[in-house]
Image (cartoon, rainbow, N blue to C red):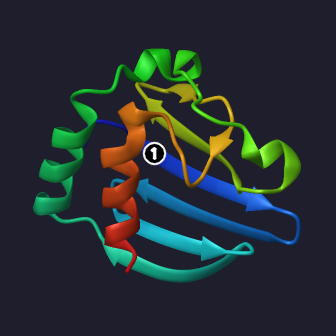
């Protein structure tokens, strides 16, 4: 696994969504209630490695944020956090419907895993 933990979280007033990936499972939460949990397979690990290869994890906090609709509640406030080698790397907040382009393939894949 290219990381120990990955967490994609989106929040707005009164509602939150979260996807957490660790070495054992992919879990989905809504309003802090676990909705779904899927065992991590070799195929999932292979695909995650592929979508992560073009992301400079150590530079997550420097990614360009294309819009800030979350500031006026027009979009959910989202972040991506990756723990690798016991270090935590986190993006600045971004709109859930308009993430930094570098993250789009990863976020789309995560959303597919929980459907």
Question: Which picture quadrant has residue 113?
Answer: bottom left
Question: Please, is residue 83 above or below residue 23 in the view?
Answer: above
**Going 54% across and 21% down the picture, which residue do you hit?**
64
Q: How many numbered marks, from 0 up?
A: 1
Q: Is residue 4 visible?
A: no
Residue that lies at the very extreme toward the bottom in this rendered image:
35
Between residues 22 and 65, which one lies in front from this camera angle? 65
Relative placement, left or right, of 81 versus 49 is right
Q: Residue at x 37, y 60 (%)?
A: 110
Q: Nearer the viewer, residue 49 or 79?
A: 79
Where is residue 8 drawn, in percent x and y?
54, 51
Residue 43, horizontal then vertical, whole percent = 11, 61
Q: Is residue 50 left or right of residue 34?
A: left
Q: Quadrant of residue 58?
A: top left
The residue at the point 55 percent across, 38 percent down is 81
Left or right: where 79 falls relative to 101: right
- Label 1 neighbour load within 10 Å: few <14, some 14-19, many 20+: some
């Amino acid at each position: 696994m290219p990381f120990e933990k990955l967490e994609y979280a989106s929040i707005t007033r009164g509602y939150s969504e979260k996807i957490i990936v660790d070495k054992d499972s992919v879990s989905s939460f809504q309003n802090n209630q676990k909705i779904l949990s899927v065992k991590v397979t070799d195929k999932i690990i292979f695909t995650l490695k592929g979508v992560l290869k073009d992301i400079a994890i150590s530079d997550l906090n420097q990614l360009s944020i294309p819009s800030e609709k979350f500031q006026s509640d027009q979009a959910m406030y989202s972040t991506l956090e990756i723990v690798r080698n016991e270090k935590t790397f986190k993006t600045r907040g971004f709109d859930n419907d308009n993430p930094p382009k570098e993250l789009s393939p990863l976020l789309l894949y995560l959303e597919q895993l929980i459907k």
